[in-house]
Image: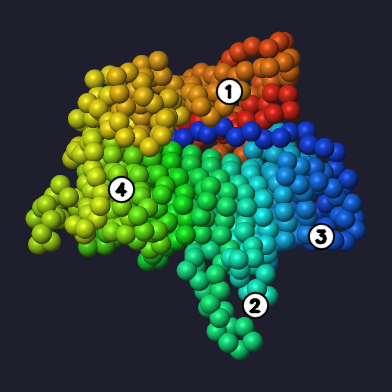
Amino acid sequence: MVNSKHTWSSRRISLVFLSVVLLSCSLSAATSNPQKSKIVVALTTTLVDASVSPYNQIQPGDTLFFEAGTRDYLLIRNFRGENGMPVIFMNIGGVVIIDTDHQFGISISDCQFIRFSGTGSIDNFYGFKVQRVLAGTGLGIGYMSSDVEIDHLNIQNVPIAGIYAKTDPDCSFTSTRDKFTQYNTILHDNYILGTGNEGMYIGSSKYSGQVVTCNGRDTLLFPSLLDGVKIYNNIVSFAGWDGIQVSSASANCQVFDNLILNDSQDEVPFQMSGILVGGGSKCDCYNNYIANGKGDGIESHGLGGYRIFNNIIVNAGKTYKPEDSTQMKHGIFVSDVSVQPDSSFYILFNDIINPKSDGIRFSSIVSRNNLIASNVIINPGNFDYYEHGNTGFRGKDSYVMIPDASAQVALKNNWFSRTQDSVRFAASNYSLLPGSPLIDVASPETHNVSFDFYHHVRPYGNGYDIGAFEYNPAYLGITQKEPMTKVVESPFPNPVVKIFSIKYQCEFPADVVLRIYSLQGAKLFEQSRLCPSAGSYTLTENVENLPEGIYLYTVQIGKQQFSGQMVKKN
């Protein structure tokens, strides 16, 4: 039976829309029309092993299709693609549904250069659905797997995490830090709803080592590092613990354009955040929308040397023991768990609205030359707690709390206010209206942040704007993303009331198809047209009859497919 607290009803979508009203819609290119598969995996098959027939015929660049329908768990192991020619695993003929009494739904073991993708059916945005696992995780990537891409999966109501991606060291000593590195872990366009633990658990949280008993002796082993992590355009809702946790990702890590809703539902101490950059990580964390969670919006326990920018964090921790102000939850929290000496944190251009406690709590003293600049912080809950309590702090400290005076951090051009009225946010989202005092007054120290929440270019006008949005009158009501892709721009307006439009670029004559899906992945609309010659074109769709909520879309141009999200309002 589905736990009622994790059920995503139409009423919940409406409530989320009213509180979120805007989300980041990154575009992701996906390959369509893959090479002809040698094998279609039957519904009764649970083990797909490249070391045995018939799967030993598979070559780099080949595709295995999985027959649509309800099936037991899947164990996929020993496949080897090549850089630029992954082995692709894809659904065919509809949705593959995993319903199992096993301890996992899908397990990827000892594989390299593979892509597991639910893009095999045009009628379904999510071609794989893990709908029930008895006692484990939805999808696991482990046993020295590397160079793995996972996309277009729907994982619901699993007892542990939605997605695990790590290899723990053991007494074989083959997967320790000096022997193995997990490269290029790419997770995008997935929808994870109602997990018992983390929505995504990426990399080992035991960066400083873990004791393993080998041959009767306790041995300290260091887990492998991750190099090349991209987590983007995912929706994670009602996670029991952290929404997204990334640890031991020491190089080339990005977490961006994700929508995190209602995290930390089980209220487990030290497991409560929308996004957690864990020990040993060095991850740029940007353009995420995090709303209505019980935990901190973003927790940073990593190595330092990274940026946290353009995030919108709404009501962080507000529903966690609301009557107990001593139980602190913050918009952004920075610690010294694994900070490298003299590294720096750059916290820039974030919108932090109504956090339970502090807007930003900066508790790192090991780092140096830190910068907190050009953020908007509205109505931190600790204002009155500090103002009238016996803590020795003033109310205004609740915007940015620095408990230790030895911390080396500069505050520049932030906007602090008890109410939103003074900043002139648009009613439908937190973008800026003409005359906003945030326009052109941000700090010029941007650390190469050249775009805003919508990926509009910064700066516009006479200077940078404070907060997640850069005001540009040409984009009022439009969420066009310029730097992310030259092929397809984001839909406009967004939110949309009646007419949904999207611009795209054709480099040669091709068929173009726009499809709109429900949040659950069912196709609602499809429109096709011919791109007669190279040039710029616009597709439109009347969505007036759709109820309020969040929707998905794809634009297919020839063999390329791009996907994103939109919000409908009445």
Specify the amino acid type for callout 2.
Cys
Tell me if I can see residue 477 in this picture: yes
Q: Which of marks 1 and 3 is nearer the N terminus?
A: 3
Question: In the structure shown, which secondary structural element does the residue marked by tag 1 occupy?
Answer: loop
- Residue at the (71%, 10%) spot, across then down: 533
Q: Residue 336's x, y, as percent?
A: 35, 61
Specify the amino acid type for callout 4.
Asn
Image mark count: 4
Question: In the structure shown, which secondary structural element does the residue marked by tag 3 occupy?
Answer: strand
Q: Residue at label 3?
A: 49
What is the distance, in whole Å, between disc 1 and disc 3 at their CAs? 39 Å
> Where 168 sits versus 32, above or below?
below
Q: Looking at the image, is mark 1 or mark 4 nearer the viewer? A: 4
Q: Residue 202's x, y, as percent?
A: 54, 57
Q: Do the residues labelled 3 and 2 touch (CB within 8 Å)?
A: no
Q: Residue at label 1?
A: 486
Which circle marks residue 370 in the picture? Answer: 4
Q: Looking at the image, is mark 2 or mark 4 nearer the viewer? A: 4
